[in-house]
Amino acid sequence: MQTQYVNCPNCHSQNIAGGGLCSSCGAMLPAYNAGPMQPQNRPAVPGADKKVLAGVLGIVLGGLGIHKFILGYNTEGIIMLAVWVVGALFLCGIPSLVMAVIGIIEGIMYLTKSDEEFVHTYIVNKKGWF
């Protein structure tokens, strides 16, 4: 028996029929079955376009928190930027180094996740730290 799929009306991601909620965005799936979808016709995951940019900025400029601003986490970005600046100016750079390491770790985490997992974790669920 072939697995049947249904497309989410909200984000157009492919889901296994009968799941009830979209695995990408959490929207309610339609009750009908749209039939199997070929992998090469699968639409791009909305929000996944930020993954590479946020990941690279996290690795290169992680201490400044720019990758947080890309994802819309303004509070977290301001915290990282403030800690980096205060640490660089007044505390011998130790806090700045810590922020840089956090940025590198987060950048690597962003880049190693699948598009669907990235969107679910950081766009839909708004996980601000790690």
Image: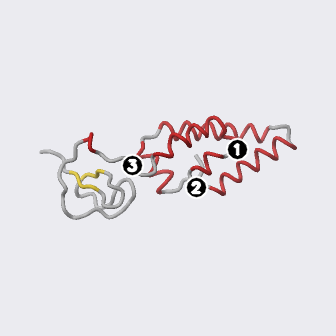
Q: Residue at x 54, y 41 (%)?
A: 53
In the displayed structure image, the side of residue 43 where residue 65 appears, left or right: right
Q: Residue at x 14, y 45 (%)?
A: 2
Viewer-closest of 7 and 129: 7
What separation in Å lies between label 1 and label 3 (alpha carbons)? 28 Å
The quadrant of the rendering that contains the N terminus is top left
Residue that carries the numbered disc 3 in the rendered image? 45
* Residue 63 location (% of width, % of height): 70, 41
Give the mark nearer the N terminus: 2 vs 1: 1
Whether pointer 2 and pointer 3 mark residues with C-beta atoms closer than 8 Å, the reply is no
How far apart are labels 2 and 3 at the CA level? Answer: 17 Å
- Dot 1 or dot 3: first in sequence order is 3
Q: Nearer the viewer, residue 11 or 97?
A: 11
Left or right of residue 82: residue 113? left
Element assignment for label 2: loop
Q: Which residue is mark 2?
A: 72
At 65% from the left and 53% from the top, the residue drawn is 76
Three-letter amino acid code at disc 3?
Val
* Residue under pointer 1: 64
> Which amino acid type is shown beneath numbered disc 1?
Leu
Looking at this view, name the residue that lies furthest to the left. 1
Secondary structure of the residue carrying numbered label 3: loop
Q: How is the image coloured?
A: secondary structure
Q: CA distance from mark 2 to mark 1?
A: 15 Å
